[in-house]
Amino acid sequence: MVTMDQKTLRETAGQKFLGVGGGILAPHRADEAIAFFDEVRRIEPVLYLGEDSWLITRHEDARAILRDTRFSNNETAVHRDGEEPYGEGFARSMLFMDPPDHTRLRSLVQQAFAPRRLKSLEDDIEQAVDELLDAVVDQGRMDVVADYARPLPVWVISSILDVPEPDREHIQDLAQDSSLTLDMEYLSNEATERALNASVALQDYFRDFVEARRISPGDDVLSGMIAAEESGEVLSNDEIVAMADLLFVAGHETTVNLIGNGTRAMLDNEDSLARLAANPELITSAIEESLRFAPSVTVNGRTASMDLAVGDKCIKRGQHVIIPMGAVNRDPERFPDPHRFDVGRKDNAHLTFSIGPHVCLGAFLARMEARIAWRRMLERITDIASLGPSRYREHVTLRGLESVDITFTAAS
Ligand code: HEM
């Protein structure tokens, strides 16, 4: 039997997702979205939105979908029966592939992001962080985004890929605009054009970059892929270029926003920064809580490659599931008191890094950057106070703040 609640929800929910700017997924509507997802979860946790799209609000359902390869990352292939399976640019990367192509490509870069390999970067990251703090510590104020969070991940991922110093600023700007291609259905014409132009320019940059690596290889991750290709591994030049693009874009904006969004959440919620400063051992749980509560990737999704059951519903072949973190990371069945930000939260199984075969390859790296950045910040500055509220940037999928302005005293 359909209840009145269900009827109203079914008739109105689809409207909420329409429109330039992302509808209810728009960053400035985050609070409204979270309240709406709570209602949907209570009334109809797997909700049909119209236009072949379903909304998933339960943690358990999202977890099962993300682990199930019958839910495809490659919408184009599902819709075209495998013909011309991949799009252009960033869309050609393994993020939008299924096995066996996804498995083949991921296995070639996995080692470079293994904790054992990344540990050796720790001292260099700490030095980079200290240099950023040296530049502001005597001023008594900084913008945590522009002065601290933004320069760090680009430096780290450029070091891993061995991108030359003079090129970094330019491709950082391109990567920022290019990451907007993740929001294609929500963008204005102007933003679409900017995103596509940036994406083409970034591809061109990495095409030349891979050519240069062919002539003089190093011991970086892309030279490793080129060597694999030359020793007979099935691999195309386009796949290597798309990997470079993916690693740079994925390794950059997401981590800037983890540090920016997390700092904002700590400033806004019950002296969390002071609690963390007094209890440095809480750093791990503070990072996980920032990822859960103020996620820098706000929405994930899949396309059903065949008719598949989720809860009591059947998702038909070719239909999409939308998995917002504001819903599944706030499911009270999984997270007690889910709307409370708690830097000491235990057992924090958020889905911000996804789960299953596409689980974020850079999760260890992102956590390491945030850990060092917040640890050194709290060791070197005290009496941190917010200088006012922050505004979100236009990105929908990769949510981040324009600025987080603070005042502080240099620690003695
Ligand atoms: C807070 C920071 C980050 C967040 C929240 C994040 C989130 C995600 C998510 C949600 C996915 C999986 C999408 C899916 O299920 O389809 C993903 C994939 C990926 N991430 Fe991250 N990421 C972060 C940082 C990084 C960093 C630092 C790197 C470094 C290179 C990175 C590289 C990748 C790659 C290569 C993939 C594709 C994996 C695959 O398709 O197998 N990410 N990330």
Image (tube, rainbow, N blue to C red):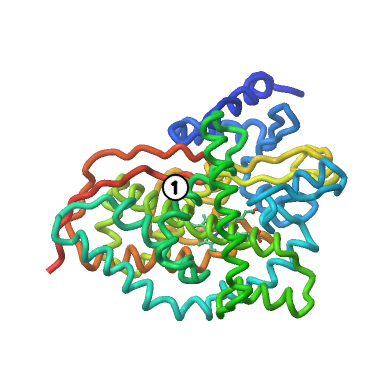
Element type where label 1 sits in the image: loop
* Residue sitting nearer the eye, 101 or 258: 101
**Residue 304 screen position, x and y as percent:** 79, 44
**Residue 191 screen position, x and y as percent:** 52, 34
Using residue 254 as the reference point, say whether residue 99 is left or right of it: right
Taking the image as drawn, is residue 222 in sight?
yes
Q: Quadrant of the N terminus?
A: top right
Q: Amino acid at mark 1?
A: Ala
Residue drawn at x 53%, y 49% is 297
Q: Quadrant of residue 13?
A: top right
Figure quarter occupied by ligand 1: bottom right
Residue drawn at x 29%, y 66% is 279
**Residue 274 screen position, x and y as percent:** 24, 57
* Residue sitting nearer the eye, 217 or 181: 217
Residue linked to disc 1: 294
Is 138 above or below relative to 173? below
Q: Quadrant of the C terminus?
A: bottom left
The tally of labels here is 1
* Residue sitting nearer the eye, 76 or 6: 76
Taking the image as drawn, is residue 23 in sight?
no
